């Protein structure tokens, strides 16, 4: 059963463009001013005032603290694992998680936490108690074949569920 879930998630990652995943920002992808990642009642919004804000039912629970520090801001998930807010190509905020080049993905999870995966390197620390698990899929980019599937069980699932990760280089 777990193999079927992984295969289905893997194939979905190839069939759907990253813009179809409302809660995911892949390496090289951006959120422009006014755009959001969403997961249920949670949203991570790149505001027009250049502040990146995590909302829970419309209430701010975290922000980058970059209110009015620029204009035409863009949030970029870089290929080195660093999440950066740029104002006219000048960095005004960063997660400071850059390191090696690779495949990274920013996820707004079902538990409200925002996490950079690849090698787990940064999170907002805003996950809510008693929340459900997360499934992550990274699909191949260009001529490079890479896939990552992470299955974290929901709290009410049997304890014999496992985390699975598949990487093809």
Image (cartoon, rainbow, N blue to C red):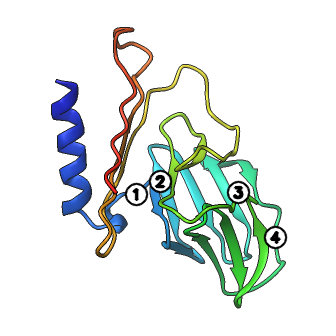
Which numbered dot is residue 97? 3
Callout 1 environment at 10 Å: few (<14), some (14 to 19), or many (20+)? some
Query: In the rendered view of the protein, which quadrant contains the N terminus?
Result: top left
**Earlier along the polypeptide chain: callout 4 or callout 1?**
1
Q: Which percent across, then down, holds residue 119?
A: 57, 46
Is residue 70 positioned above or below 55 on the image?
A: below
In terms of depth relative to the viewer, which is nearer, 20 or 45?
20
Residue holding disc 1? 22
Residue holding disc 4? 67
Q: Which percent across, then down, holds residue 147?
A: 33, 53
Name which residue lies at 24% across and 48% down. 10
**Mark 3 to mark 1 CA distance (whole Å):** 23 Å
Kindly report which numbered mark, 4 or 3, lies closer to the viewer in this rendering: 3
**Mark 1 to mark 2 CA distance (whole Å):** 5 Å
**Earlier along the polypeptide chain: callout 1 or callout 2?**
1
Circle 4 sits in a helix, a strand or a loop, which is it? loop
Name which residue lies at 21% across and 53% down. 12
> Do the numbered discs 3 and 1 sit on residues whose CB atoms are within 8 Å?
no
**Mark 2 to mark 4 CA distance (whole Å):** 21 Å
> Do the numbered discs 1 and 2 sit on residues whose CB atoms are within 8 Å?
yes
Which residue, as the protein is rendered here, is positioned at the far bottom? 88
**Earlier along the polypeptide chain: callout 3 or callout 2?**
2
Tell me where residue 156 sits by quadrant.
top left
């Amino acid at each position: 059963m777990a193999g079927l879930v992984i295969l289905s998630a893997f194939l979905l990652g190839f069939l759907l463009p990253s813009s179809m995943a409302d809660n995911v920002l892949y390496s090289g992808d951006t959120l422009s001013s006014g755009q959001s990642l969403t997961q249920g009642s949670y949203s991570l919004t790149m505001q027009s005032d250049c502040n990146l804000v995590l909302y829970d039912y419309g209430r701010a629970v975290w922000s980058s603290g970059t209110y009015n520090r620029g204009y035409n801001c863009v949030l970029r998930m870089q290929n080195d694992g660093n999440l950066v807010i740029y104002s006219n190509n000048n960095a005004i905020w960063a997660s400071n998680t850059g390191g090696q080049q690779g495949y990274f993905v920013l996820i707004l999870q079902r538990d409200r936490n925002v996490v950079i995966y690849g090698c787990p390197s940064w999170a907002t620390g805003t996950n809510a108690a008693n929340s459900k698990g997360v499934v992550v899929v990274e699909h191949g980019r260009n001529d490079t074949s890479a896939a990552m599937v992470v299955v974290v069980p929901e709290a009410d699932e049997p304890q014999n569920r496992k985390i699975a990760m598949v990487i093809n280089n």
